[in-house]
Amino acid sequence: MRSPDALSPRQVVKAGLCVGCGGCAAQGRDAGAHLRFDRFGRLRPDGPREWVRTASSSLARTCPSSPAARDEDALALDLYPTARHLDGHIGRFEAAYVGAAAEGDFRALGSSGGMVTWTAAELMRRGLVDGVAHVKPAPAPRGEAPFFAYGISRSQAELKAGAKSRYYPIEMSGVLDEIRRVPGRYAVVGVPCFIKAVRLLCREDPILRERVAFTLGLFCGHMKSARMVESFAWQLGTQVEAVDAVDFRAKDPGRPANWYTAHLRLTDGSERKQDWWHLADGDWGAGFFQYPACSFCDDVTAETADISFGDAWVEPYASDGRGTNVVVVRSPLLAQIVPEGSAAGRLELQTVDAGFVRETQAAGFRHRREGLSLRLSRRRGLRPRKRVPADAPALTWRRRMVYGLRQAITTWSHRVFWLARVLRRPGLYTRWAKASLAVYQGFAWSQGRIGKLVDRLEGKRA
């Protein structure tokens, strides 16, 4: 299908390709553009009918899901033409590390190794940026009001107050407005599609191009809708209106880092906690409340960011409850700053190669490579520009079933939760979620066991 020369926000949403980043709204402010939550708790562009429906060449060039936008390879080639390494999974990079922040309380405050906040604070300490745009707890969350939102921190204390992972829909049109309005140099923290959107917008907007000095990327599995918090509240015996604060990954150094614990603080001062694996929709890989657009993403490690951070989901790091980061550095300047921090004892880092980084995100890469190839082969209508061929790889029927069940859970979790919400019957959703998860995990488990057995038999024959 030929890439469109112009796109409207409505076309992107209707095609299931909107990630709710807010880039289109930032460009359409004069027309009254903004974002709102849809009935499924996903952020969507909204505004005057004329703006929503009018196709523009600018949106076609700047929407991260647009078939006409430059892909990650093309953007990275312009940004990092002299990169020392090139890998088909993590892109261009100067160096990669595994470890954590050693100084202060950066590691303790973060969900993982504290490297994101340390790097942002170091850029600020060195006078390289005046502010950092990142996601923070919203001032007054209630019901439909968001629990988190982008904001700009201008001190280390503000940065630390915004540490930790936020599995919640947010958008960046407001901070892009502030960056345009207030002169200075800024760093932007975001998931891969958001960083890509910033890069594309900088190509069109000279003010953003001048003021966005650094981008800090976060490895990403997929975006969740706002309904996940509501579901957690239901399962912990309360309503979302009673929730005052959310911690998706309450940290306990005495437990493995990959044992996620959801922590809700209620308006009456009480607290509710539960490990994710005891929740009906607590299996991240199953795809509950996933944005539809995430099914068509091929960037796991934020390949257009100056530096990217993920969790080191391999042993012995996955069992270290203090949290450990894997770090991919692309900017030549940051390739000097990070080793300096390590040499000074402020960071505890070991150099790793691309293979190690791939191993830490193995499940995500399978889903974004062979899984994406299968989904693209079945895609009809507007198709995003991807670096993965749409050729339906030769997968076993069990593997195809795993991907199919994951896609079904992604689609139906939004709908079943909406119905349960309308009928005020939380049990309708939780019973469906438990049953769906049991079927999915049964196939995923058997696929893994059978695959290992086949590999073992083939190894003996060899």
Image (tube, rainbow, N blue to C red):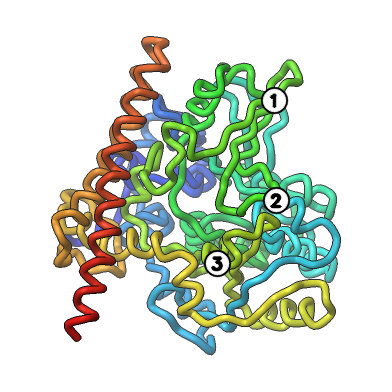
Query: What residue is disc 3 on?
Result: 315
Q: Give whichever of discs 2 and 1 has the lower sequence position.
A: 2
Above or below 235: residue 225? below
SS of the residue under disc 2: loop
Task: Check the picture and name the quadrant holding the N terminus.
Answer: bottom left
Give the mark nearest the N terminus, 2 or 3: 2
As drawn, the label of residue 189 is none
x 45%, y 72%: residue: 358
* Residue at x 73%, y 81% (from the top left corner): 339
- The answer, for residue 285, to whether it is visible in the render is yes
Q: Image quarter for residue 141?
A: top right
Give residue 254's mark. Answer: 2
Q: Position of residue 314 (x, y in %)?
A: 52, 66
Q: Percent x, y for residue 180?
A: 66, 53
Residue highlighted by disc 1: 271
**Cα–Cα gap, marks 1 and 3:** 32 Å
Q: Residue at x 51, y 33 (%)?
A: 32
Q: Compared with residue 126, is residue 153 higher up or lower down, i.e. above or below?
A: above
How dense is the environment of label 3, judged by Cα within 10 Å: few (below 14), some, or many (20 and up)?
few
Front-most of residues 324 and 14: 324
